[in-house]
Amino acid sequence: MKPEIKNLTLPELEAELHEMGEPKFRAAQIYTWLHRGAPDFSAMTNLPLSLREKLADRWEITAPQVVRKLVSELDGTIKYLWRLRDGNCVETVLMRYHHGNTVCISSEVGCPMGCAFCASTIGGLVRRLSAGEMLDEVLFTQLDSGLEISNIVLMGIGEPLDNYDNVLRFLELVNSPEGMNIGMRHISLSTCGIVPRIRELAESKLQLTLSVSLHAPEDSIRNTIMPVNRRWNVEELLDACRDYFQATGRRISFEYAMIRGVNDSVDDAKLLIRRLRGLAAHVNLIPLNHVDESPLEPSDRETVLRFQKQLEDNGVPCTIRRTLGSDIDASCGQLRRKYQEKTGE
C-alpha cells in the first residue's frame, strides 16, 4: 500500500512539495483539503491536474467506510464501526453533552493489555492505528453526523501509550490551526498505566487531561484484573502520576470501574483515599459494562453511591460517569466483537 499522506504535518508536506519542485503554497491547499475530508486527490479542484496525478502516484488518502452505525434512542449517542483500508475494523463513539460533542476514538485494532473487564482486548492486538487513521475517526464522525466535534477522548479500543509515537503525531495533527484546531485542553488520553510512557508524556508538557484506568487501590486486586500491574504496580503508577502533575500542572482523572465483590467495599474506598492523599486527582466511578466473555458483574447503585460519598466526605473529588448509549452497546469493543462473530472476519 502507498504511504498515507494524512500522516504528514504541514511542515513535512511543504518539504515534500519542495522536493517535487512545487511551490510552498500548494502544501497548505492540500493540507486544507485533507483536513476537510477530501476522499481522493481528484476532489482537490484548485490544484493543477498534473499535480493531482503526481500526488495520487505517490500517496494514498485514507477514508474509512461505515460498516455499522447505531444511534441511541435514549440520548442520541452514535456508535460507528469503521472499516479501514486493510479490512480491519475499529469503533468510534459520538456523545452529546451540554458543553459540546465529544468523540471517543480507538488507537489500535484490538488491544494487548488483557484487562479482565474489557471487550476490546479479547483476541489481543492486531495492529496499531496510524496518526491519519485516528484523525479520520474524528473527521469522518463529524462529517457523517453533521455535528461539530469539540472534545476528544482516546478511550476506545487499544492502549494509546502502547501506540505512543502515532498518538503524539495525531495530537499534533488534530491540534493544528490549519486543520481541525481542537485544543489540547479539550482532549483526554486514557492509559492503563504504562509508567515509562507517562513520564515521557510529562516531559512533552502537553495540556491535555491524563486519565488513568486505576480500577483498584492495591496490587492484589489490580494484578487479577489488569495484567499491566504485574509490570508497574500501584505505587509506581501513582508516583509517575505525581511527577506528571508536577511537570504539567494538570489534575489527573482516575477511572474506577465498580465491580461487584472485587473492588467496591468500604475498605477499598478507605485505601483509595489514602493512596490519593496529596495528589491533585479526580475519581470517575464507572458502572461496569457487562461483557459476555467475562464473569465480572457491576456493583449495584447503592454500593456505587456509598463509595462516592465516602470519597467525597474525605476530600477526594468524585463523580459517577453518566451511562450513554446503553441500548446500542456503546462501551468499546462490543460492536466490533459481535461483528466479528457474525461475519467471521
Image (cartoon, grey):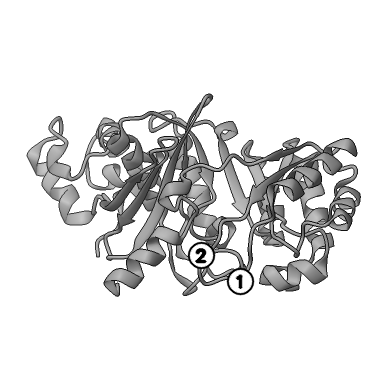
**Residue at numbered disc 1:** 295
Q: Along the horizontal axis of the image, is 341 left or right of 184?
A: left
- Nearest the viewer among 152 and 262 is 262
> Which residue position holds label 2?
119
On the image, the x and y values in percent for residue 26 come to 24, 34
- Residue at 43% across, 45% down: 93
Q: Quadrant of the C terminus?
A: bottom left
Residue at the image position 86 percent from the left and 54 percent from the top: 266
Q: Position of residue 242 (x, y in %)?
A: 81, 47
- Between circles 1 and 2, the one closer to the viewer is 1
Q: In which quarter of the image is the N terminus?
A: bottom left
- Give the structural element (helix, strand or loop) at label 1: loop
Q: From the viewer's perspective, tell me whether residue 309 is left or right of residue 225.
A: right
| 345 relative to 307, above or below | below
Q: Position of residue 196 (x, y in %)?
A: 70, 61
The image quadrant of residue 335 is bottom left
The residue lying toward the viewer, choosing from 63 and 319, is: 319
